[in-house]
Amino acid sequence: MGRNNPKIVAFCCEESGMPAYEHALSLGLELPDDLKVVALPCGGKAETGYIMKALDEGADAVMIFACYEGNCKYVRGNIRAEKRVNYLKERLEKIGLNPERIAFCPVAPASGVRFAELVRQEVEMLREDA
Amino acid sequence: MSNQQAVLRIPEVAPELKEVEVVPEAVVAGDHPTVLAMADSLSTMGISVTLIHPYKEIEEIVAHMRGLMEADEEVSKKYAFLCEKVAANKSIKVMSEATVDDVSGWWGNFSVGILQKGTSVTLKTSGIAVAYKGNPVLPEAFSAEGIKSFSDFLAQFDMRKGALKEATNPAKRVAFVLDVDGRDEKWASVTALRFGAYLKGFGSQVYILCRDFKVSVDDMEREYRLAREAGILIFKYRDYPRIEGKRIIFQDASAVSEKAPLDVVLDDVDAIVIQEKVVPSKGQEEFLGWLKIPQEGGFVGPNNPQFIGRTPKKGVVVAGDTWYPEYPTDGYVTALSAAAELYKWIGRGTYQVDIQRVAEVDPSKCATCLTCYRICPHDSIRIERYGERNVYITKGEKEGATWEAARVKVETCNGCGLCASECPAKAIQLVYYPDLEVLEFLEKT
């Protein structure tokens, strides 16, 4: 864990997170190189196992980019993802880790700026925390 | 920073196709007038339609339509014409005095239980289109104040042009109170504006009190401007208005800051029109429950705003109040798009389904906990009997017995992976994107 280059794993919904990431790339916005992007068919596919594995393997933060509420192609995948994240945050707090290391971030498919902004905020938060 | 992130994309697996035969036939059921639009539209597309309605004569579907439909003569005429057209169409099989009793099955193979004059019939069909009518009730906020029935006030349900004209003759002061139950419904704004403009023509003073005013219907922006110019006053209130006899008191949301609330008082209001709340009928709630279609407050619409008339369940479309209480012109459009959506699924005869982009259950791991069955948004998981042994439970220990496990219906699975992510026994995997790929990618982050 570098103090200045925290490692972030981003689980991106195929319908919103991935297009937002690609939009951010096409705009030439700055994203950290230590970002690992995992495309998933739905934000709701970001399992507890995936998130914990990422933290276990040395990620400083895990971000789940899913659709806004009411926009899920599969009706309530994003709601399930958010509930799961809230549950995991509770567990992290119990074992003495910063719950902010897991973040649920709803984005629109064409909001690359928002994507980059959320990642930048997370990096800043981790730097302060370190 | 050079934007060189490691990215794991969803693998592009060559599709493995399975042919599915679907007979182009559909059941159209319900008591909302939009069933006529759906039946007519599907019949034109060459689908054999069975229309199930609870009335004696088909004309009664239109006769029993909601009061607000009479607001628009054009719409009334359109539905009356549709009714004649459907009655004259010999290829539409009409079952009158019949209600849907039970529905089960999947796209291409639904079985619909029908109760007709005391006898029950079961129909096999490929697709289902449904439009039920909702029931109007007085919003809770008003019933709490001792207002018991519609007769105390002029509810929009009872509102006919004639009735309101009589109640406000000679010209009087009329107030429309909308959005009391917190749901903003477009039809209420549109109806209030049209009736308001109509009454304004006779010299009445018209007030519209609302939380949010929606006019996104064809031509309504123009009518809204004209109504404002003609002097209809539209207020946005913060808390719902108090009604004391002929007086309405409310806090104007746009004019005051929260620190200095200002009560606005409308005195001597002769007629108060309250927007009723539309609640789903019993038949509608049962129907959505049988097919496990996700609903919000008994309606499909707010859960699924992108695809008009579509439900997550393949082969089932909805219109009318089953979709969402709508202004009649909007409801007609919803019915047509629902019919077009159903045609997409049952009109072509043979379909090719990709059986790679689906989830698969490992029956030896499945504990039959029903988590996936509960979660699947497309209702494509059932518990079925496999020949293999189940690790977690020991069902049917008798001779020749089989073991139960969840099974994904590949024809209706969309491969979203929600079941796979929730399965406590990790018995479900996406065929095209197994867990192992993601976990390997995450190693040494």
Image: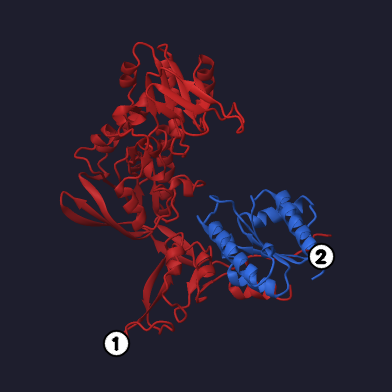
Chain colours: A blue, B red
3D distance between C-alphas at marks 2 and 1: 62 Å
Q: Amino acid at mark 1?
A: Lys
Q: Residue A90 location, x and y as percent?
A: 60, 66
Q: Nearer the viewer, residue B260 or A27?
A: B260
The single residue placed furthest to the left in the displayed view is: B118
| Residue bearing the label numbered 1 | B398
Q: Which residue corresponds to the image point at 39% horizontal and 33% vertical from the top-left?
A: B328
| Residue bearing the label numbered 2 | A5
User: For residue A41, which quarter of the picture?
Assistant: bottom right
Q: Residue B362 location, x and y as percent?
A: 48, 78
Q: Which residue corresponds to the image point at 74% horizontal and 52% vertical from the top-left?
A: A117
Instruction: Work out whether B94 lies above or below B242.
Output: below
Q: Nearer the viewer, residue B269 or B96?
A: B269
The single residue placed furthest to the bottom in the displayed view is: B399
Which quadrant would the C terminus of chain B be assigned to in this image? bottom right
Answer few, some or many: residues within 10 Å of disc 1's Cα (few below 14, many 20 plus, some between 14 and 19).
few
